[in-house]
């Protein structure tokens, strides 16, 4: 698989996973990739990215928004016969 195709598929699947997760998690109040996030610049604790601000809530309302970090490796190897064998 070419790198370009891999990236397109990965981005599409991540986007679909976000939509599906938001639907499945509605009852828990969990949101993936929410809108109206005010980023935090001086606070890196616990992967805190920022706060979700809601106009309908009190001014002091600040719901924390956390980053979820994945560490994924992709590699490709070439066999002695010169043919590429993709591995993950």
Image (spheres, helix red, strand yellow):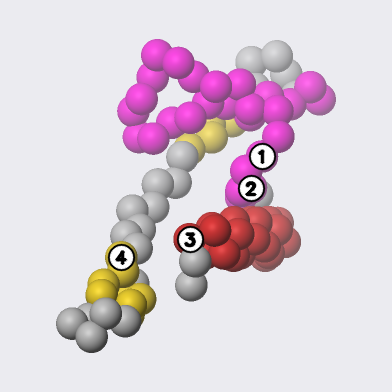
Gap in angstroms between the C-alphas marked 1 and 2: 6 Å
Q: Which is more N-terminal, label 4 or label 1?
A: 1
Q: Which residue is denoted by mark 1 in the rendering?
A: 34
* Tally of numbered discs: 4
Q: Is residue 65 magenta?
A: no
The mark nearer the N terminus, 2 or 4, is 2
Image position, residue 5 (x, y; %) = 57, 64
Q: Which of pointers 2 and 4 indicates the residue nearer the eye?
A: 4
Judged left or right of residue 86, residue 27 is right
Q: Earlier in the sequence, mark 4 or mark 3?
A: 3
Q: Secondary structure at mark 2?
A: loop
Residue 42 vs residue 78: left or right?
right
Q: Which residue is mark 4?
A: 75
Q: Circle 3 is placed at which residue position? A: 3
Badge 1: how crowded within 10 Å, few (<14), some, or many (20+)? few
User: Which contiguous range is marked in magenta?
Assistant: 30-56
Q: Residue 29: x percent and y percent?
A: 65, 49
Q: Of the two numbered discs 3 and 2 on the same chain, state the one appearing first in sequence.
A: 3
């Amino acid at each position: 698989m070419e790198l370009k195709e891999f990236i397109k598929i990965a981005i599409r699947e991540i986007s679909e996973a976000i939509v599906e997760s938001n639907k499945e998690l509605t009852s828990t109040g969990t949101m993936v990739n929410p809108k109206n996030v005010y980023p935090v610049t001086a606070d890196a604790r616990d992967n805190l990215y920022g706060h979700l601000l809601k106009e309908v809530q009190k001014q002091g309302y600040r719901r924390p928004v956390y980053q979820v970090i994945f560490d994924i490796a992709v590699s490709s190897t070439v066999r002695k016969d010169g043919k590429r064998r993709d591995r993950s």
